[in-house]
Image: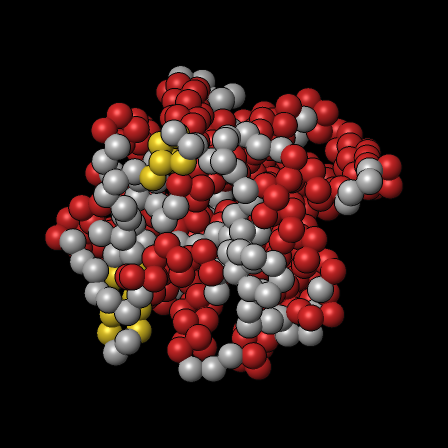
Amino acid sequence: MPMMAVHVTNEYFNHTTVHPVGLATLVCCILAILCLPRRLAMLPFLGMLLFIPSAQRIVLLSLDFNYLRILVIVGWIRLLMRSEYRIEWCRLDSWFMAWIAFLNCAMLLRTSGSMIVYQMGLTLDAVGGYFLVRNLVREREDLLLIARVSALLSVPIAMAFLLEHATQRNLFAAFGGVHEITMVREGRLRCMGPYNHPILAGCVWASLAPLCAGLWPREGKDRIWAVIGVLASGIIVVCSSSSTPVFGAAAAAMGWALFRARGHLRAIRWAIALGIIGLHLVMKAPVWHLLARVSAVGGSTGYHRYLLIDRFIHRFSEWALIGVNSTAHWFSGAWDLTNFFVIQGVQGGLLTFVCFIGMVAAAFAGVGRMIRASRATRTDLWLAWGLGVSMLTHCACFIGVSYFGQSTTLWYMTLGMAGSLSVMPVMHHASVMQSAQRLVNNMVPVRRHSAPSHSVSTLRDTVDCC
């Protein structure tokens, strides 16, 4: 369990926190999920994720059901009621389930009582949310719709952040779950809006900006929304006044800068890897000590992040088997696990850590597969690249923060979209083959009397080459 999450939101655990507006929003989202067509069913999740604090929850028999968790359950009820469950299994799905399995096994062996119940809730969020997205997002148009709605919703969120920055009052505090008075660090206001922490607020929108940018090659309103989404996301990142979202945005900019060099990504990856190894060999300190030297915003805790990685590596034998219950003895302040990669090993051991890395690699591979399949269509290519850059932004943010709350749900959504899009070329190919085969079968009786037999065989050969 991320200790940072406990520090920020522990006052809301096991307490029903319901605001009338939040409850009305929940009811509307439930009705929308049950009634809307499949391609629109993801929009209520997105609206709830971006606007309502995750501390809004209903507690039944000591079990916490935050609003996003309730929507996941309702979404699965919809899938079962409408028989919409249909999934083409991919490599990312296998890595995801292996990660969940090893993490839960380690938690069961190491903890007991309320922590097991808490972990089961997180598992419901992860597995339920991921496979719900895998079933609801099936076509490129579904991803396009999510990008458009994200750009649209960025406008009121950015306006709320600007107002918070001007007044030092958080409008979303009325819902409960977030602080009313804006945090200040070294004279900088750290706006957080409806999110659990200013860092997470910036990370959420730094990772959504590349998806909005994917709308650029489409003419008309989509190009306008691409600009608006990127600018509004930038405003939110700046208002959060945190280094991690700034580095995430820098990673997104670097990802888009490599767009023209997309044919040489393998060489670029090897160059980056060899460059990091070279730096490690020539530097007096480990290469990860660079985190202690870089700060985009005054007051950032880069040295803490360096120590966390350094102790994680040097104490490998301590956590490698099934993780550890506490890291507080590693160094002063080590209880604050501000690294999402490190927390995988701390919570689940080496196998969980390896499966998490494999899951991320499989997600990138799936997006790459869609990019190769979209070379003939510039609009699809940009959209696929935007999703890949969004994945890169998440990974850059993982180095400086451990996700929880809405940011975790967004991460599972991004993985789910990557999994769905990775099988779209296969599904599209299969549908083309089926349609062409039906065409051949319908033409055969006619061709027997009106055309030479080699015409049918030629058409079949053409179908086989598709």
User: Where in the figure is residue 127, as x and y percent of width and height?
Assistant: 48, 64
The number of numbered badges drawn on the structure is: 0
Camera-side residue of 108 and 436: 108
Residue at coordinates 82% horizontally, 38% vertically from top-left?
A: 283
Residue at coordinates 36% horizontally, 67% vertically from top-left?
A: 80
Which corner quadrant of the image does residue 169 belong to?
A: top left
Residue 4 left/right relative to 14: right
Camera-side residue of 463 and 123: 123
| Residue 128 appearing in the image | no
**Residue situated furthest front in the rendering:** 332
User: Where in the figure is residue 87, as x and y percent of width and height?
Assistant: 52, 59
Residue 419 left/right relative to 37: right
User: Where in the figure is residue 86, as x and y percent of width and height?
Assistant: 48, 60
Residue at coordinates 30% horizontally, 38% vertically from top-left?
A: 182
Camera-side residue of 431 and 45: 45
Q: Quadrant of the C terminus?
A: top right
User: Where in the figure is residue 180, as x and y percent of width and height?
Assistant: 23, 43
Residue at coordinates 40% horizontally, 61% vertically from top-left?
A: 6
Camera-side residue of 266 and 172: 172
Residue 72 left/right relative to 372: left
What color scheme is it?
A: secondary structure
Q: Is residue 134 above or below residue 383?
A: below
| Residue 228 appearing in the image | yes
